[in-house]
Amino acid sequence: MFEVSLDLALMLIGAAFAAGFVDSIAGGGGLITLPMLLLAGATPLQALSTNKVQGVFGAATAAISYARAGHVQPRRQLKAAALAFVASGAGAALISVLPTEGLRYALPAILIGIAAFFAFKKGLDDSDRQQRLTPALFTLSIVPLCGFYDGLVGPGAGSFYMMGFVTLAGYGVLKATAHTKFLNLASNLGGLAVFALAGAPWWAMGLAMGVAQIGGARLGSLVAMRVGARVIKPLLVVTSSALALKLIWNLVQGA
């Protein structure tokens, strides 16, 4: 039934549940599922594409949960979501063309910067603050950049969306989290569309992981809405730091 043995399938399903929980709160779920997929024997392209399959379910569940609770109005994000979809598809299509070596060296520093910002910046809570970019300019600049990264690289895209909403759009932490999920869903779908055309995903395994993602994302979004910035900020710091450390380790191993 699955592309892997039953014990590996169960491991991946458990990882997807945990990733759904983490991703719905702070992003970074790919930090859990991508290494697990590679460990299970997937090629890098299979791992990236299967990660998109299961990630769509978690992002959709989180987006619906936040929308139902009134923290976001998806209709007002449709244009931004369309840009994220197209930009992510472009990133996925250019994986084999663009040199990403420089990005691999810069990303750990960027992620550590994000972790430090949320760890030490005073006054970061669920209250809105000064807006530095108009909604139109934010949609035309930050959204496609994050979407393109999501298609080209993947893990950490949620943290970049989140950082943009807090620092540039002036959103409170919970509101930023809610608005990130719909765009994350769109960029997941954009990357998946390209990967699907290439026939890369493990569909059976990805769909099974997707079901687990639904459970994890639902639980995580409920926790985030109940506790707010008090749980979102620490988890964002942990996931960004962990992803940075993993990228540094990969660079050391490849040296």
Image: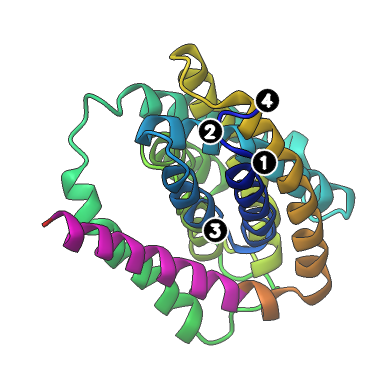
Q: CA distance from mark 2 to mark 1?
A: 9 Å
Residue 185 visible in rendering: no
Q: Is residue 239 magenta?
A: yes
Chain-order first, disc 4 or disc 1 = 4
- Tell which of 2 and 118 is nearer to you: 2
Whether pointer 2 and pointer 1 mark residues with C-beta atoms closer than 8 Å, the reply is yes
Q: CA distance from mark 4 to mark 1?
A: 13 Å
Quarter of the view holding residue 96: top left
Q: Quadrant of the C terminus?
A: bottom left
Quarter of the view holding residue 254: bottom left
Whether pointer 3 and pointer 1 mark residues with C-beta atoms closer than 8 Å, the reply is no
User: Could you tell me the amino acid type at mark 2?
Assistant: Thr
Residue on which disc 4 sits: 1
In this rendering, position of residue 121 left or right of residue 112: right
In this rendering, position of residue 195 left or right of residue 62: left
Q: CA distance from mark 3 to mark 2?
A: 24 Å
Q: CA distance from mark 4 to mark 2?
A: 16 Å
Pick out the residue farthest to the top: 197
Residue on which disc 3 sits: 162
- Observer-side mark, 3 or 1, equals 1
Residue for point 43% across, 74% down: 115
Q: Does 75 appear above or below 179? A: above
- Observer-side mark, 3 or 2, equals 2
Residue on which disc 2 sits: 50
How many other residues sit within 10 Å of disc 3, few (<14), some (14-19) or many (≥20)? many
Which span is picked out in magenta?
Answer: 233-254
- Observer-side mark, 4 or 1, equals 4
Residue on which disc 1 sits: 209
Chain-order first, disc 4 or disc 2 = 4
